[in-house]
């Protein structure tokens, strides 16, 4: 079982990368790869650039990572109520790869979000939950961690027992459903 994880952020100090990395630590015997969106920085998507230069190799590389995985764990940063430009740019480039089965690869996906505020990225999480299935993703669970800096500590652990229990319960369900 290959788990592919990434944060929808290109921040070097991404709190979503910390959260998604934490979520993967509950899987001890699986192959886990954590991507950094900075390694997939491409020109800003435009149909003109696509027509002129074709697809960037990095879009194909990222799509291959998705295709080779069995489970996706993503944690989305919220910018002005929606995806970050870094995430959306990769999404848009992948979406125009010809003959790709379902843009998002048809993968079971655990979608998380966190933010420093009390809404915990609720808008971007809702956006992902309601629209990613149209692009292939099967959203199997969602998890929001509000007020990141109050609920996550320097040892990369969720300190709020209620939120940690919620995350663990969702992960245990994923284990039952997918680690056969
Ligand atoms: C341009 C910009 C827009 C933002 N918009 C939101 C927002 O709509 N909702 C929110 O909860 N936080 C918002 N934030 C705060 C982010 O949640 C915060 O920067 C968080 O650390 C982003 O996650 P990351 O560290 O994983 O990149 C915004 C931050 C920036 C820089």
Image (cartoon, rainbow, N blue to C red):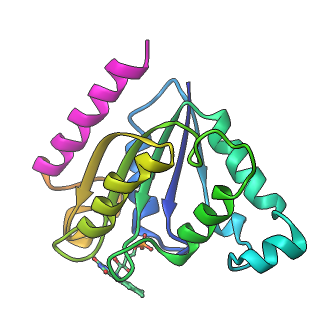
Q: Is residue 41 above or below residue 106?
A: below
Q: Is residue 79 left or right of residue 91?
A: left
Q: Residue at x 41, y 63 (%)?
A: 76
**Hey, which residue is sitting farthest top in the picture?**
180
Q: Nearer the viewer, residue 142 or 162?
A: 142
Q: Is residue 113 left or right of residue 5?
A: left
> Does residue 177 belong to the magenta stretch?
yes
Which x, y percent locates residue 30?
53, 27
Q: Nearer the viewer, residue 68 or 131?
A: 131
Q: Is residue 143 left or right of residue 6?
A: left
Quarter of the image for residue 169 reads top left
Q: Nearer the viewer, residue 114 or 27?
A: 114
Quarter of the image for residue 52 reads bottom right
> Does residue 32 belong to the magenta stretch?
no
Which x, y percent locates residue 176?
32, 18
Task: Please name the predominant secondary structure of the magenta segment in the image.
Answer: helix
Q: Residue at x 47, y 43 (%)?
A: 137
Answer whether residue 156 is visible to the viewer in this image: no
Which x, y percent locates residue 32?
57, 37
Question: What number of labels is visible?
Answer: 0
Which x, y percent locates residue 57?
83, 59
Q: Residue at x 77, y 52 (%)?
A: 60
- Quadrant for the N terminus in the image: top right
Q: Is residue 168 left or right of residue 58?
A: left
Q: Residue at x 49, y 41 (%)?
A: 72
Ligand 1 quadrant in view: bottom left
- Quadrant for the C terminus in the image: top left
Residue stretch rendered in magenta on the structure: 162-180
């Amino acid at each position: 079982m290959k788990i592919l994880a990434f944060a929808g952020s290109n921040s070097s100090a991404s709190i979503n990368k910390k959260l998604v990395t934490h979520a993967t630590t509950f899987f001890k015997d699986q192959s886990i790869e954590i991507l950094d969106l900075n390694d997939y920085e491409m020109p800003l998507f435009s149909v003109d650039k696509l027509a002129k230069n074709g697809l960037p190799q990095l879009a194909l590389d990222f799509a291959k990572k998705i295709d080779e995985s069995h489970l996706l764990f993503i944690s989305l940063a919220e910018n002005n109520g929606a995806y970050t430009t870094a995430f959306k740019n990769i999404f848009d480039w992948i979406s125009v790869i010809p003959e790709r089965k379902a843009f998002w690869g048809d993968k079971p996906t655990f979608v998380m979000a966190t933010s420093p505020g009390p809404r915990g990225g609720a808008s971007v999480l809702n956006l992902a939950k309601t629209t990613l299935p149209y692009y292939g993703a099967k959203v199997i669970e969602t998890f929001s961690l509000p007020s990141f800096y109050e609920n996550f500590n320097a040892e990369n652990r969720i300190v709020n027992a209620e939120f940690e229990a919620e995350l663990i319960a969702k992960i245990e369900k994923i284990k039952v459903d997918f680690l056969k």
